[in-house]
Image (tube, rainbow, N blue to C red):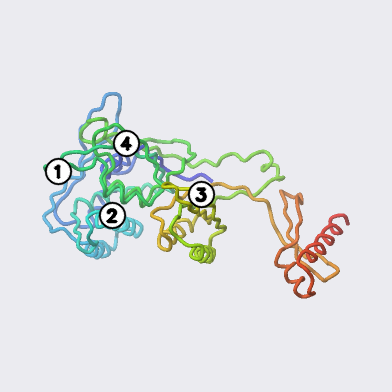
Amino acid sequence: MMDTIAYVDCSVGVSGDLLLSALLDAGLSLARLQDVLTTVAMPGTYCIEPLKVQRPGLSGSAFSLAVQDTGAQRSLAEWRDHLLQVATLPVPVRENTLRCLQCLLEAEATVSNTTVATLRVSSATVLELLAVVAGLHELKLMALYFSPLPLTHGFVEKEQQLLPLLSPVSLEILRPHPVSWKPSTLSTALVTPVGAALLATFARFDPPVLSIERTGSGLGETEQNWSGALRIYLGRAQTVAEPDFIQSGQGADTDWVAVIETHIDTMTGELLGGLMERLFAAGALDVTYTPIQMKKNRPATLLTVISPLDLGEQLALLLLRETTTLGVRIQHIRRLKAQREQIQVETELGPMLVKVKRLGGQVIHVAPEYEECQRVARAHNIPLAAAYEVARDAIKSVIIG
């Protein structure tokens, strides 16, 4: 199956205006986007206008969100009420814009040691988020992938203060997410809080397999350190060719799962035992604990959870709520599976279920089921090992017969 996806090369940074410019350069209709924004009736006046920006050896688009905000800044609750009143706004656009906005404000509240309810947001910020979210919706992308982000170091002077080049708000937004960072020598702010909020809401960071059909470049208003060049590649998701042993019908089933990992060094064995029960009850396919050694010579535990793709984020949030960890890593991994089923065999102690493993149409292995052997052992008051032997004898007779 072929689906439209996008890959964003943000090795020199990401912001709302750069991402919007790249989307417009890649084919997003400016007229359609303006139609959506016009229905929202933002406070003040605004316009999306093209900029004339020249880059040696690089062509692309630059658009400026020019806002004259004559209205007072609003709280998250007030913006939510405002957007809910716009009946023509597509539901995914409204919900994802509010998700981005809440993500941004929660990080600001953490950094400034206050609450979300006390913070106010300008029309310019909401418009920047809304424009990008509406653009992504208009292009009907199945998934949005991002390259590793530039990790800058040092400080910049602003309003007679020295501020980190990497915004503390941007870092707080992205900290819980499986973002890859690469050290950068560029001496300017590259990842804005709005850009970080968009990544936290939409981004996937596992490498995609796609055939490129069109590209777009988003250019900033200046070319200082090339910080204003962001490229987006749109194409079709490609299915990796199956190995011969799978194509021949002699092999395994294949699917994708989410693998969630985190390190824990401040929880007791009792709490970890209860956590495993909660994870399985919430839909985890497997949960394992591995002893590891962490920094400061602390013995700790590597917690690994395998889950269906659609439960990955839910289980990751469960870990953040119910453990002492500060962050989790999520990967989407392809796996091969043998076919499995239970069959009933007749034994000298009555019928028992056994598990059969097949690869394609070939039986690879047949083994007793633990629960069945326990049931028979208790019913006949014999050792568990004896029940296993009875099951194995019946399996041999079935296979030989």
Q: Position of residue 95 (x, y in %)?
A: 33, 59
Q: How far separated are the C-alphas under marks 1 and 2?
A: 21 Å
The answer for how far apart the CA atoms under marks 2 and 3 are is 31 Å
Q: Nearer the viewer, residue 117 or 293?
A: 293
Crowding at dot 4, Cα within 10 Å, few <14 / some 14-19 / many 20+, comes out as many
Residue density around tag 2, few if under 14, some if 14–19, many if 20 or more, within 10 Å: many
Residue at the disc numbered 4: 230
Which residue type does callout 3 highlight?
Answer: Ile
Tell me the CA gap for discs 4 and 3. Answer: 39 Å
Q: Amino acid at mark 2?
A: Ala
Q: Which residue is mark 1?
A: 161
Q: Nearer the viewer, mark 1 or mark 2?
A: 1
Q: Which residue is mark 2?
A: 107
Residue 134 visible to the viewer: no
Classify 133 as above or below 382.
above
Task: Residue at 17% x, 49% y: name it.
Answer: 46
The image quadrant that residue 192 belongs to is top left
Label 4 vs 2, first from the N-terminus: 2
The mark lying in front, picked from 3 and 1, is 3
Secondary-structure class at tag 3: strand
How far apart in space, not on screen, are marks 3 and 1 (Cα)?
Answer: 42 Å
The reply, left or right, for residue 274 in relation to residue 102 is right
SS for tag 4?
Answer: strand
The residue labelled by disc 3 is 292
